[in-house]
Image (cartoon, grey):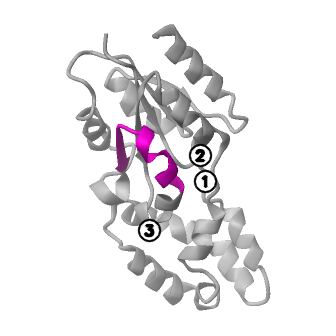
Amino acid sequence: MPRPQLILDVAGVLVTNFSPQAWSGFSSGEDDGALVSLPHRFKEIKNDLWVGTMTEEGFWIWLNELFPNLASKVDRSWILQQLKPLTAMEHVEAWSQHADIHLLSNHRIEWLTHLLDPILPFLRSTTISSEVGYCKPNREVYERVQTHFPKEHAAVLFVDDQEKNLVPARSLGWNTLLADAEEAWMDQVTTFLNDRA
């Protein structure tokens, strides 16, 4: 019997989400207006940024044009400081003893590399939207992950922190699990793997 296939989202599952509240650290004077509108304006370009249509350089140009005062204080190093590993990161090695682990994330690879490097030896594949040109919940990105599965039928579990991203996975016959903020989902992953050991 082939090993189970465990697919993990990154932001909200293995590392912190990039929270709009992070911008509050810049709240002062004329930046306040930018802080109110930036999360809304970011939604307008987020898909392009995640799929690589907008480059990282393009993102900094966009930020500087719309919010020049804020842009002078924000760079890649600041972004990287906002992303922190979550508890699940510590379980990846142990889970890899019982399953093939795949990452599937809507993100910029440049912003994740420093966090993912320590767990790369325990991963079967990484699918990051900025590298492949597709974003969840587009079915194409899930099908791309499936190309890394064994040819024999295997049990599959996909963990994501957004319900909308679980829907296409279910249509492909994957088991799904919604990651909760309290991280209770990790026990369910362990149970899933133990039941198939």
Please report the residue visible at 43 percent of the width from the left and 52 percent of the height from the top.
Answer: 106
Residues at discs 2 and 1 in contact (Cβ within 8 Å): yes
User: Is residue 92 in view?
Assistant: yes
Give the magenta range: 115-127
Q: Which residue is mark 2?
A: 12
Q: Amino acid at mark 3?
A: Ile
Query: Residue sitting at 44 percent across and 85 percent down?
Result: 61
Instruction: Return the residue nearer the eye: 23 or 193.
Output: 193
Circle on res. 45: 3
Residue beneath label 1, please? 17
The residue at the far right in this view is 28
First-in-chain label (3 vs 2): 2
- Between circles 3 and 2, the one closer to the viewer is 2
Query: Is residue 150 rendered to the left or right of residue 96?
Result: left
Residue 113: within the magenta?
Answer: no
> Where the N terminus falls, by quadrant?
top left
Q: In this orientation, which residue lies closer to the viewer: 19 or 35? A: 19
- The alpha-carbon separation of the residues under discs 2 and 1 comes to 5 Å
Label 3's element? helix
143 relative to 170 in the view: left or right = left
| Residue lying at the far left of the rendered structure | 151
